[in-house]
Image: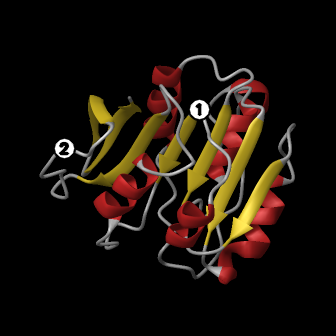
Amino acid sequence: MRITGGILKGRQISVPQGIQDIRPSMDKMRESVFASLGDLTNLSFLDIFTGSGIIAVEAASRGASVIEAVEQDKLKRKILLENVSISPRRINCRFMPAELYVKRAKTAFNIIFLDPPFPYRYKWELVSKIACSNLVLPQTRILIHRPRPDYLKQDIINLHKTDSREYGRSVVDFFVYQ
């Protein structure tokens, strides 16, 4: 996988061998999503279900100043730490379940990106919990990468859906906290 923009553009990062549940986000999808986010200079960025860390490193490459990556799977720890080490900015890695991280959160972020494993059944409940947590402030943007058939069936309180973009069999939904 490669970084698609910013000061690390073109740099390669690693994906753990033999680990089937990492779904490296497609280069074109990442490039499109980050282009839509615009300038990240001095913005804070949270990457939940970070996996290899590619989204967090991409955010750092594009100027985000405070970056956290959350991953539960201890088998991904070594490769995640190796990948974030190329970042021009510190990326704080938290190794815990996403639900626990959200529950304990004390810091708000400008942008929150979730890329749960496609079989994860509680994605919309987690987005709802984020919308009622300390992670958000007015105008926080929340993005979720999901399989196309797993659409949001009802509105989430405090969130306004601003966009939805399809990338093959997956979709990224964009929300703003209000």
Q: Nearer the viewer, residue 176 or 56?
A: 176
> Which residue is more in the foreground, 34 or 139?
139
Q: Amino acid at mark 1?
A: Asn
Q: Does residue 21 appear left or right of residue 2 in this picture?
A: left
Residue at 42%, 41% (x, y): give it: 143
Q: Earlier in the sequence, mark 2 or mark 1?
A: 1
Kind of residue at badge 2: Asp
Q: Is residue 112 above or below residue 149?
A: above
Q: Which residue is mark 1?
A: 110
Residue 155, label in figure: 2
Q: Residue at x 61, y 79 (%)?
A: 73
- Secondary structure, mark 1, is loop
Quadrant where the C terminus lies? top left
x and y, in percent, of residue 114 in the image? 47, 52
Query: Which residue sits at x=59%, y=32%?
Result: 110
Which quadrant holds residue 66? Answer: top right
The image's colouring method is secondary structure
